[in-house]
Image: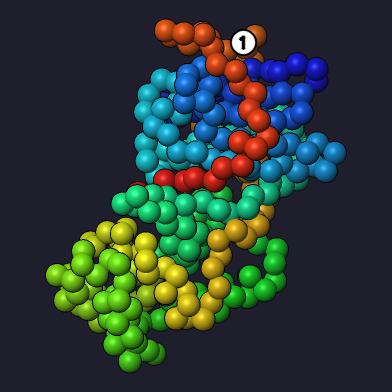
Amino acid sequence: MNKTRYFRISYEDYVFFASLNKDHEFEMGNLNSKDGSCVQIDVHHSKRKADLGGVMFNRNCPANKELARKEGTVSLVRCALKVILLLYPSITHYTLTDKSWFECRNRNVHLCNHNFLLYGKTWYQRHFEATNRSGLTERTMKRFDRVLSKKPTERFSVFWGRFDKLIRNSSCYKDIRDRLGTIRQMYETCDDWHDFFRNVHEQVGCFFFVPMLKHLFSYFSYGTFYGEKWFISAMAVDGWTLDGLKIKEIKQLPAQIGGRRPEVKKEKSKRRKQLIVFE
């Protein structure tokens, strides 16, 4: 392939534009606007794999309408992974280094750790059947999940005092001190730790996790999952049914309204971003 190929992709109610250059670098989003690419994937044809290098949430990722939070980001990534498999049917898997985060009150929260507390799985595990091939990490996650799957009062009867102390010494205390009674009630009545953290997220807010994630993982004596390498099987992606997915190769991107079409080619140093907005 000697030149860049362009595609118009429609999925669900969204329209995306994509480019694929001679180095097998794929970008998808609203490429005919200043918002640029929202998904970046590097295909290593000879190794039969593709690296998911960056996912950037932006409401203007589609060319025709705003991208919905949560479900919209999942649709964006699923669509991109499926398109790559259709263009490169010989690949066997995708890889990614999970450095995803979301912003809460101008602070960054590691999405993998946050989702593991709430659901027992990282965001990529939940939505894309991602697996971790590190035996140590896999065993750690299983041990941690066994702890989080129990009622707080069942096994850690003295934990509330320690937990209360962590909260009072954290930067979020001034924002939630009036909610400590509610948090204590959640602690005593929840089904398990996952249920507790989900209730806290919904009823108290994401800012609770900004200072607390590090303390919570440290308390349970488990390391962070931030920066771990994950794999998504091409067989799993092949089994997804993406109703209404349409891919059309076009000669060039449509002209940007009010100005020239921006350059699609990005510098290598700018291709490694990981941002997923969960809120």
Q: Identify residue for label 1.
A: 252
Provide residue 14's location: percent of width, then percent of height.
44, 26
Provide residue 111's location: percent of width, then percent of height.
46, 56
In the rendered image, the quadrant that contains the N terminus is top right
Name the residue: 32% across, 58% down: 206
Pick the front one: 4 or 185: 4
Amino acid carrying mark 1 in the image: Gln
Name the residue: 71% across, 18% down: 4
Name the residue: 63% across, 70% down: 138
Is 178 rendered above or below residue 9? below
Q: Secondary structure at mark 1?
A: loop
Is 100 rendered above or below residue 168? above
In the rendered image, which quarter is residue 137 located in? bottom right
Provide residue 6's location: percent of width, then percent of height.
64, 17
Neighbourhood count class around disc 1 (C-alpha, 10 Å): few under 14, some 14–19, many 20 upward: some
In the rendered image, which quarter is residue 245 located in? top right
How many tags in the picture?
1
- In-image side of 29 versus 229 (left or right): left
Pick the front one: 107 or 83: 107
- In-image side of 11 versus 168 (left or right): right
Most distant residue in the left direction: 178
Q: Is residue 113 visible?
A: yes
Q: Looking at the image, what colour scheme do you see? A: rainbow
Q: Is residue 190 visible?
A: no
- In-image side of 61 versus 83 (left or right): left
Is 139 rendered above or below residue 228? below
Name the residue: 53% across, 77% down: 222
Provide residue 238's location: percent of width, then percent of height.
65, 41
In the rendered image, which quarter is residue 224 located in? bottom right
Is 186 rendered above or below residue 79? below
Pick the front one: 104 or 17: 104
